[in-house]
Amino acid sequence: MDNATEVTAAGIARLAGVGRAAVSNWRRRHADFPKPVGGTETSPSFSLADVESWLREQGKLAEVPLRERVWQQLVGHPEGPVTALVYAGCALLLIHERPTAWLAASAGSDERMAAMLPGALEGVIVPRFGAARGRGRGVHRGREVDGAAAVNSPGSASGSVNAPAEGSAAAATSGMAAVNSASAVNAVNTANTQTAPNTASAVNTPADLTTPPTPVNTARAVNTPPAANTTPAVPTPTGPQLLPTAPLLRGVADLAAELGTRETFEFLLGRHLDANPRQYTLTPPELARLMAELAGPAGTVLDPACGTGTLLGAVAPRPEQQLYAQDSAPDLAALTALRLALHAQVTVRATAGDTLRADAYPELRADVVLCHPPFNERNWGHDELAYDPRWEYGFPARNESELAWVQHALARLADAGTAVLLMPPAAASRRSGRRIRADLLRRGALKAVVALPIGAAPPYNIPLHLWVLRRPERVLGQPEVLLVDTGRFATEGRGGPDWQAVRGAVLDAWRVFDRAGRLDDEPWLARSVPVIELLDDDVDLAPARHLPPATAADGADELTAVRERLGETLRLTADLTPPPVDHATDPDRPTRWPLTTIGELARGGALVMRTGGNGGHARVPVLTDHDVLAGTAPSGLLPESDEEAVLTEAGDVVVPVLGGGSMARVIDDSTVGAVLGRSLVLLRPDPAALDPWFLAGFLRGTANNRQASSYASTATRLDVRRLQLPRLPLDEQRRYGARFRALEDFERALRQAGRLGEQLVRGMYDGLTDGTVMPE
């Protein structure tokens, strides 16, 4: 039983298609319900096989989607989900590169498969990632010098990787011993030091420079103590390790046949990252794409703080391309190596180790370095690395770990190579780093500083910077630096900035500057500044402090455009203003409607009632109570949970339950398909019985909300089941619904007019105070 895949009560509920309360009832009422095999007293876990058998006997086993079954097998793996992901990734790589070898190994019993897979896996793992080797003289511009040559370049015209022929793989399947990797894979499972997948790594476990790198991507891992030796990032699993994993691997193969190998791994990895949001700091893929585009095409790319591989995955593949990666967390190194190998037919080398203390690629000279380093690290090796040759531009202070990463990136670049790093804004202005910043400017290494909008990457409340650096070949007589501020492209809510506008502004300015060495001023957006202007006592590189203000004409034109839009909106608002109120004079109209409640309608099947708050496994925007109240697009985020997410559909009515306001919103094109967030209740009316606009309109009545609310000392909560509706024929409901819908349009126009009015007022204040608008 110790080796059995385990499942929690929430997982059992998902398998049976019921709530967790039902599972608790089964445990109390049925003496033959499987006993816990692990977990804790308050959160026990059960054998998945025993649970499925019991559910099947009771006729309670729901038709579980293949994705859900595979995910349950992965999270319940006896060695943990990370190790299970590594095993699954290895199997997917074998299926992708040698499907016939997979079919041969997986035929027959689980025992036979576990015995044959190590040899078959080694036939793809070693060519893709390398094997342990003696110390060589390193690599130069991606080529190994005096070491084992990289085997993983694309070989045939069909694009398959250079790997042993199928016959030799079969021989390996029958007799090749698996690489001694038990300890390495266990290390993957027990490493609990990860903190950031997608483009930032923290101080890592030092790599043994005698082992070949394996790919990782873009995430930061927390400091782990340096180790004397490391193994390849993806060791070959042994037969005993694979035996309890056999059901998972077969499920993964079935899912790959449905989705594809790469998509299957991305699904499982993404779901794991979503389920552990506090362990990882992800770099948004839009930001990774922008960084890769700033760096340009490259044959050899390094990410020294790679995490889960987002940055390297954003690089456009090229023939004979080589990707190098290093990260402190062995689990991230293994997962991202597999991710990159499944992403494209390129050479992948990655290793686990502390990049600053134990650089795995001391002789690498890459075309491009992309990096999201850990911020504000004090234990980065300041005391041990005082005389390190990488500090070509000055020895970083203890609180300037980011400048240590900047100089590491420059040291690994080939001449004229480009590095792009994500940096905290303080690195551009802290006095402790001014001497290094000054030397970077004087020698022409720092080419551009780009201020990103708030919300571009975590921490989302800070406008982070991008630094673009180049290994200088020669210094121009009067060098300039490009400064760009994209703060204007921030958007409301938590949905991130307008990435299309950010990319367009940054790339347009960079390409002109990179080609000509200078850029004409773009007010409030971009400027190329002579280095001599920045070499003062502070060497402050914050873009906003050096950008030119708008000219009087530009300011006036912008305010004129806002005023015209406000005028159009006000005219629309006037057109949408409700007509004069008609008093109820119909003698046949009853003085009081017969009423029903939402609870009665739900029990009668006229509507379905759902409660939000669970992230589920859908990686889609979340509709929050703030979005409903403000009338904005979905902007929220929720951690993944084992409960099913509630997705909105057109015609649903969403009601906030906290705060005491009278609000209900009909789901339209801007909100359809979003996950229902916390403190929201969704009502899905039967269109043959209820008009959604009629429903939403009556739910907004003040008296209706007052009688259905309960009051605590600090909050007001709405009991949606107690909200009342009149019993009206459907035709009459639609008459009311049309009027309520017109009121919604009027309300939306008022909100837009308010936003434009605020923008116009702020622009007038700014224009009058900066001289771009005259007081006439």
Image (spheres, rainbow, N blue to C red):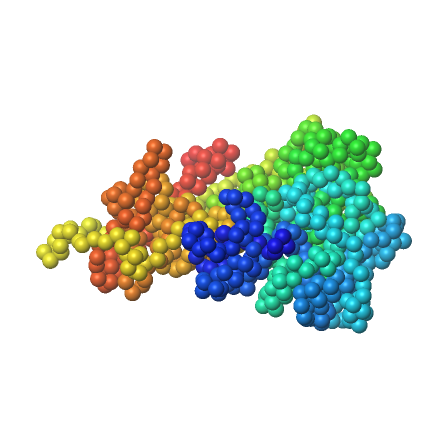
* Of residues 145 and 204, the one drawn nearer to the viewer in this rendering: 204
Q: How far from the left and from the top, in percent, is residue 599? A: 29, 53
- The residue at 61%/45% (across/down) is 280
Q: Of all residues shown, which one is farthest toward the top? A: 537
Residue 284 in percent (x, y) is at 59, 49
Give how far across and how far down residue 244 sits, in percent: 65, 58
Q: Is residue 508 above or below residue 446?
A: below
Name, please, the residue furthest toward the right: 146
Total count of labels: 0
155 left or right of 738?
right
Task: Looking at this view, name the residue that lies furthest to the front.
Answer: 31
Image point (45%, 59%), residue name = 17
Residue 375 is left or right of residue 650, and the answer is right
Q: Nearer the viewer, residue 549 or 686?
A: 686
Determine the residue positioned at 61% across, 40% down: 464
- Residue 118 visible? The answer is yes
Q: Residue 124's quadrant in the figure?
A: bottom right
Q: Residue at x 82, y 36 (%)?
A: 388
Using the rendered view, name the quadrant where residue 668 is placed: bottom left
